[in-house]
Image: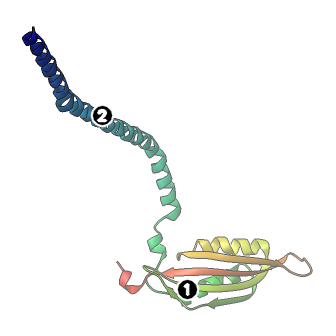
Amino acid sequence: MLFRERKQIVICVAACALAAAFMLFRYLPLRQRLKAVERIKAAQTLAIGRASMEREQMPVLREQLLTLQQVVGNYQARIPTDTDLGVFLQQIADLISRHNLREQVIVPHKEMAMKNLNCIPVDMQCKGKLAQVFEFYKRMQKLDRLVRIEQVKLLNDRDFSGEVSMQSKVVIYYRPQSEQG
């Protein structure tokens, strides 16, 4: 009887050892691998979802790009490689005269160098009717040269006759000679 009990104990210990070995060396590693695969699958599903949403946005982005390209045009062509400051100042003076603005003062300041562009701040002053001033700005924005209007100050005259004094700060740009081509 003792032999039989020992045999049953040995069988039970062997069965427990096999079960433990199966759990430690087979089931748990497979379970970890399954969880890793599930995480990868979830990440891929998320990436596919994002890509799908981004693909749906592509026509909208293309439309925005075309609109921006039309607005910006070929801005490089509007930034000359030479300062041509005299030509620009003459164009501004002609525009002011053409729009019947009086008491014009155009003062260029010291040029500033940036990474790929140089710029020259220019102060402008003149007097005239508000409609003439607005038409002047419309025409100035259509010049061949890129001009950024940084500040505009309009002041009514003292007797409110419809005349305004305009003070403006603009910046003109040009590319350094090393940036040609």
Q: Is 52 positioned to the left or the right of 99 in the image?
A: left
> Which residue lies under the disc numbered 1?
120
> Label 2: how many residues lie within 10 Å, few (<14), some (14-19) or many (20+)?
few
Where in the figure is residue 65, as x and y percent of width and height?
47, 55
Q: Is 36 positioned to the left or the right of 70 in the image?
A: left
Where in the figure is residue 121, as x and y percent of width and height?
59, 85
Q: How is the image coloured?
A: rainbow
Towards the viewer: 154 or 5: 5
The amino acid type of the residue labelled 2 equals: Lys
Q: Is 62 positioned to the left or the right of 109 in the image?
A: left
User: Which structural element holds mark 2?
Assistant: helix
Q: Which quadrant is the N terminus positioned in?
A: top left
Residue 108 drawn above or below residue 117: below
Residue 22 drawn above or below residue 57: above
The amino acid type of the residue labelled 1 equals: Ile
Where in the figure is residue 105, as x and y percent of width and height?
70, 90
> Which residue lies under the disc numbered 2?
35
